[in-house]
Amino acid sequence: MQIEKRRSSGPVSSFPHWLAIALSTFILLGGFGLALAKFRGEEAAEAPTASESPTPSPEAAAEATATPEVVVVETPTPTPTPTTPAATPAEARAAYQGKEYAKAIRMFNEAITVAQGTVAIAQLQYELGNAYRDNKQLAEALNVYALATAQNKQLVVAYQARANVLIAQNKRGEARAVLEEGLANNPGNKDLERDISVIDLSGPSE
């Protein structure tokens, strides 16, 4: 008996086609995934890490290491203050003659600062002492008279003026000592000898 071959049903005959579609889909998805992973790996390799610092260009490095320019600021030259010239001996003597003793004292002091030579200085100190004396500044007068005789030991009038101030203060013993000092520096001076005699005739001081 001849056996009749059965034809395969629809589902059985369509199985190979379905399987082919599934396999194709799986292959496509796998290939896409591999491509995506490869792209992400290349992107991560190209991106700099957080610890990396960009390398500066040669121009930027040169600017960073360049020495800053020093700006020189010029200090303005101060304008010199005009100074008043010192008084002359003639001006000081004119003030003294006019009995402007305070003014004369100032002028004699100025004149002394620019005077040249011990003789000239001693003469101005003697005249300054007179201005102090007449301005009732006796301590200053005695001091300046002593400076005058120290500068010029032959200035007899300065010894006499100093002795007269001491006599006015009732200090005849000190006055006599000043006159004796003057006489020692000027032996045989008649004026100093006479003044010493007057003190001796007036009796001892208190």
Image (cartoon, rainbow, N blue to C red):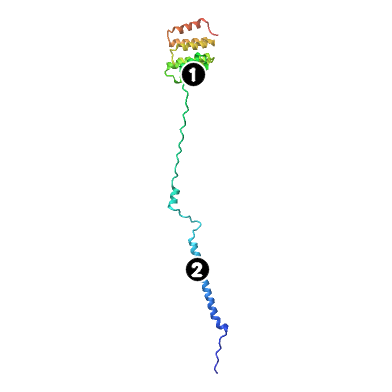
Any part of residue 15 in sight: yes
Where residue 82 appears, x then y in whole percent? 47, 26
- Which residue position is annotated with label 2? 35
Callout count: 2
For this orientation, the residue located farthest to the left is 117
Name the front one of labels 2 and 1.
1
Mark 1: give few (<14), some (14-19) or many (20+) Cα within 10 Å.
many
Quarter occupied by residue 115? top left
Name which residue type carries label 2: Ala
Tell me, yes or no, whether the two marked residues, 2 and 1, touch with CB atoms within 8 Å: no
Above or below for 22 versus 5: above
Mark 1 = which residue? 107
Residue type at tag 1: Met
- Asked whether the viewer can see residue 146, the reply is no
Alpha-carbon span between mark 2 and mark 1: 111 Å
In the rendered image, the vertical position of residue 29 relative to residue 176, given as above or below: below
- Image vertical order of residue 116 relative to residue 4, above or below: above
Residue 188 in percent (x, y) is at: 42, 7
Residue density around tag 2, few if under 14, some if 14–19, many if 20 or more, within 10 Å = few
Between 95 and 53, the residue placed more toward the observer is: 95
Quadrant containing the C terminus is top right
Disc 1 element: helix
Q: Who's the residue at 47% across and 6% down the image?
A: 194
> Residue at 50% of width from left, 5% of height from top?
198
* Place of residue 11 in the rendered image (x, y in percent of width and height, measured from the top left): 57, 82
Q: Secondary structure at mark 2?
A: helix
Q: Earlier in the sequence, mark 2 or mark 1?
A: 2
Q: Position of residue 32 (x, y in %)?
A: 51, 70
Residue under the image location 51 percent in, 67 percent down:
37
